Image (cartoon, rainbow, N blue to C red):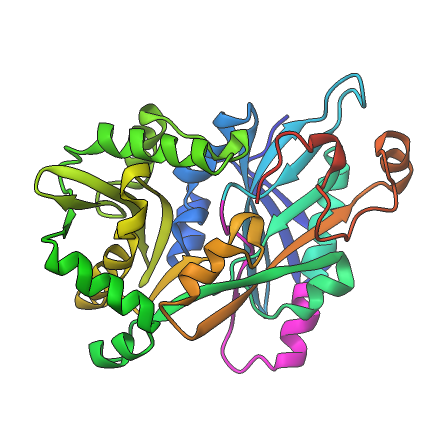
Amino acid sequence: MTTTGRNIDRGPRLTVRLMTTEDEGWPLVLSRTAHDFYHLPGYAELCAKRVGGDALGAHISAAEGELFVPLVRQAIPSQLLDGWFDVSSPYGYPGPLLRFEEKVTSAARDRFVGRALESLCDELRERRILTAFLRLHPLLTEPIEPFARVGQLVLHGRTVAIDLTMTETEIWHQVRPNHRTGIHRGIRLGHRVERDVGWTHLEQFASIYRATMDRVHAAPNYYFDVRHFEELRAALGPERLHLFMVLDGEQALAGALFTEVSGIVQFHLGGTRSDSLRLHPHKLLYLSVARWAKGRGNRVLHLGGGVAGFEDSLYHFKAGFSHVRRPFYTWRRVLDSQLWSSIASDPASVAEASSFFPTYRQRRATL
């Protein structure tokens, strides 16, 4: 199915285009728009490869502005519906990017987003795509309201971000007292945080990460091996992906991957040695990375939320570093209700925050 070089006119003022990762238009769109690493073609392609799908970039433009979103297209199992597909966001927060021309009113912005989403749905349906599932970006996807009018908008919880435009003193004052105690303790014990420029600790990090996933009984899609981390670094480039380790002498206590794009630093994946849990090395790690990121001129460190977006113990831990909260939404749309009813175990279950969508991918779905 050809996916590049095809422009679809939706009236005199709106155009829809689906691009492959090789299309020169993809990086051109990003060059005009504040974006994150989730929106890069290399990252979308890596995520698509992992699930046996292919990556697409959907671009909708008009005089008012433009909407862009990366997608992973997968074939629906043939025993359910032969010759049809679904699309979803790559892993993380790659929700639609929105850019508007100057002096466009808020009402005109809302109208454009609604028209753009409807046109995208029309185009996807023409390409035999049954459902669309998007994870919105907590920092970049605004306005939100049109998504609720065009599909099902689900609020899962909040994420935590550190405002790096504050002074270091202000950042420190937002750290929860027991986190401060843990940070001081780590420093007294001689723990240090290092950015591993040469990735010499990659094997140790991968081992720590896997042990962490085992310990928390993570879903299969949360497991990543050394090869994936190497492919991720190749896709993003060493200037965008950074490995940080918490070390006690030469022993690694914890580690994490952080990305750096467009002034946004993201916590991506991390883990702690089981025998180091009582030391809480991530407390020192998060504060050290915040200082590093601020020193490089970034404006925000996004720590994310809890498992599957919910406000659980992981969210509570992250919330101890900042007062800044951002809502995390997903958006879902059934593009052919009759076909959906024929294969969905519960055709009415589209907007439930606790349910998987689409339901037939329940075993693989993760937020």
Q: Is residue 197 magenta?
A: no
Image height check: is 359 above or below 181? above
Q: Nearer the viewer, residue 324 or 29?
A: 324
Q: Residue at x 85, y 33 (%)?
A: 345
Q: How many marks?
A: 0
Instruction: Give the percent coordinates (x, y) of residue 119.
Output: 72, 53
Q: Is residue 111 magenta?
A: yes
| Residue 155 visible at all | yes
In depth, the one of 236 and 112 nearer the eye is: 236
Q: Is residue 118 left or right of residue 137?
A: right
Image side of residue 23 versus residue 287, left or right: right
Where does residue 224 sit, x and y in percent of width and height?
Answer: 41, 30
The image position of residue 8, as x and y in percent, is 67, 46
Q: Toward which corner of the image does residue 245 lie, by quadrant?
A: top left
Compared to 48, does 349 lie above or below? below
As drawn, 111 above or below 5: below
Q: Which residues are magenta?
A: 92-113
Q: Is residue 338 left or right of residue 291?
A: right
**Residue lying at 72% horizontally and 26% vertically, measured from the top left:** 76
The quadrant of the picture occupied by the C terminus is top right
Task: Give the x, y percent position of residue 181.
Answer: 25, 67
Instruction: Identify the image quadrant of residue 320.
Output: bottom left
Residue 332 vs 97, above or below: the answer is above
Q: Nearer the viewer, residue 2 or 146?
A: 146
Which residue is depicted at the point 70% across and 71% down?
111
Residue occupying image coordinates x 75% and y 31%: 360
**Of 308 and 58, which appears nearest the observer?**
308
